[in-house]
Image (cartoon, rainbow, N blue to C red):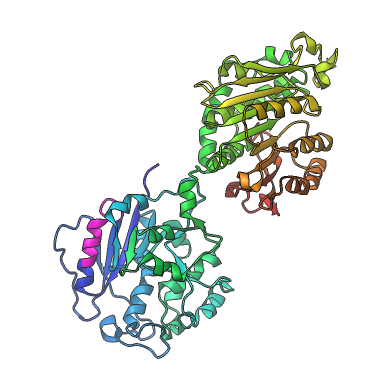
Amino acid sequence: MQPLRIALVVVATSPADFYATEHLARVLQQHAAVVVAYDDKRHANATLPRCQALCPNLEAHLVRIPLPASQLPLWVQGAVRPAAFCGIRRHDLAYSATTRWRVLAPLVLGLVYRYDFVGWTDTDVVFSVSQLHRMFPLRLDGLPPVDALHTGIMQDDVRCEWGVDAFWGTAMGRAPVRRYSWYGNLVLFNSSYWRRIAHVAFAWYYHNESWRYRWGDQQFAGILQLTNATVVDASVWRDRGYFVHDREAPHRFRRYQVRDPTHIRLEDVRASPVPSLADVARRNAAWRASVAQSPHGWITPQALERSVYDYGLSERPLRLRALLRGPEGPRPLQHDLITWLGLATAAQRPLDYLEIGVSVLKCMTTQVRAWTRATLTAYDVEEPNPTMAQAWGPPAVVAQWPQTGPRAEARVTKPSGAVVTPQDWMPHDTLRRWPRSDATHDNVLYYVASDATQPDGWKVLREQRAQRGHEAFNLVLSDGLHTPEALRYEVSQLTRQGMLPTQEQGPLTIVWDDCQGRLQTAVVRHVHELRRAVGRSDLAFHTFRMPGWIGAREAPHGTCVLTSLSLPPEVLGPGRGTKKR
């Protein structure tokens, strides 16, 4: 991924400001472009000062900053301080105009068409050269498209907010709910976002009534709430001294700082570097396409013959096998959401995944390839699909016990109508284990070949996990029989001691496939039971539809998720689902 192109604007009103900006440009030379907009507030015939040294990183513009209320230039009217101005006595019209004009500068100077992120800073901001690599390039991987990044928000003097709500009411139909402003000495915005709100920015600057008051760029901060912007809180940069404004100590900054719970804290992003769902889907799709286009595909016809239920390929297994080998379409599959949830979980605690109903191992092998240093457990009435499982090498049979469910029947009529004798190839129910290796992508794999609606396999699985020191399952996909009765039994097993983590033990996510109709009703009924059983108050319940294992060539699958994680916006966008707590 190419580094984001960043431009920082400095509005300079004196030669001293210009030379300070020149020095700033040299400091930031390898990290961000510096753009100086120059309007001398003392001299009518101002010209751009010349750089005292080479200025390869400085873009200079001679501008005329307008004063809409008076129509006079800055050098004539700038020293006036209207009676309604709040705050420091030295704050005059020149101060208000130059800080407000920073909002327009990215648009007026065309920066939003040449850079990915644009923003502004001040000449009295000092960057720590040794810490710049921690700030730039911006590392926003794993996040939804970010609209803005600030380095702190605060409660402003109420007198500085006079008239703001009236403007927002006229321009946007409502005022912001939360009252705060950003610290204006380092703010960044996605250029596409700034272009979208350009008309509001111009209306705000040229609002004549506002020039009675000391508005600065901080009074434009309400736009973030009113547009539901995706905002990153990078106050950690200031808190850790990566830059300092006007010799301000971090403890003084923290005294006035407030937090908006809707903003994404940058320190959390750095601690949990998870790629976006779209990036996950692209990588997964490329690998799945290589499997689908191989001579054997996801399963061979010979493997289908030695199965109880044709590995879940319904009444026409060969037709569905062919569909599985076709193009999946452009949208992420449910398999990709599982990958993303696993990566998000692994960023906080070791990943321990359980998949109930694994069919031909399409989802399971997708995860084996996408994750590393995880523990994955498959539970299915069928034997492991040899077409895919053979890539992991020979497993160890950890335990075996008498057959259960349809595996124990003398003759089974499959959905396709074929009649088989399971005991011909599966004399026992088994628990198999594959150790960490290159073939398993450094993951530990388990496969329970047993009927998941019977207690035997669950008992063996619990005992073996306890003996080997495994923690609770923190990611579960329920994709088995899809009936309320089977769901009820799964819940009764999952809610046993130690199967699912408590809130103190880290994140938890349970996903149900084909969650619609009677099954969705049953899932909703059991959500509260699951919350109570693990004693968690942080689990949110979501329902939405997304492409299933075949992709675009079948209807989207109803999907239910109970999770302590924040889901990617692609699955909870407008019209794609609901959220219940």
Residue extending furthest left?
A: 52
Image side of residue 438 versus residue 308, left or right? left
Q: Is residue 117 visible?
A: yes
**Residue at the spot 84% in from the left edge and 35% down from the top edge:** 485
Q: Is residue 325 visible?
A: no
Q: Where residue 381 sits: x, y (%)?
A: 75, 23
**Residue at the spot 29% in from the left edge and 85% down from the top edge:** 79
In the figure, residue 533 lies in which quadrant?
Answer: top right
In the figure, residue 420 lies in which quadrant?
Answer: top right
Q: Where residue 537 sits: x, y (%)?
A: 69, 53
Image side of residue 269 versus residue 316, left or right? left
**Residue at the spot 31% in from the left edge and 55% down from the top edge:** 32
Q: Where residue 50 sits: x, y (%)?
A: 15, 66
Residue extending furthest right?
A: 410
Q: Where residue 207 sits: x, y (%)?
A: 45, 79
Quarter in which the C terminus is drawn: bottom right
Which residue range is magenta in the image? 20-32
Question: Would residue 178 be counted in the magenta stretch?
Answer: no
Judging depth in this view, the residue of 551 and 218 nearest the camera is: 218
Judging depth in this view, the residue of 432 and 9 nearest the camera is: 432
Quarter in which the N terminus is drawn: top left
**Is residue 519 positioned above or below 263 on the image?**
above
Image side of residue 506 versus residue 62, left or right? right
**Is residue 219 positioned above or below 337 on the image?**
below
Q: How many marks?
A: 0
**Is residue 55 positioned above or below 309 on the image?**
below
Majority secondary structure of the magenta segment?
helix
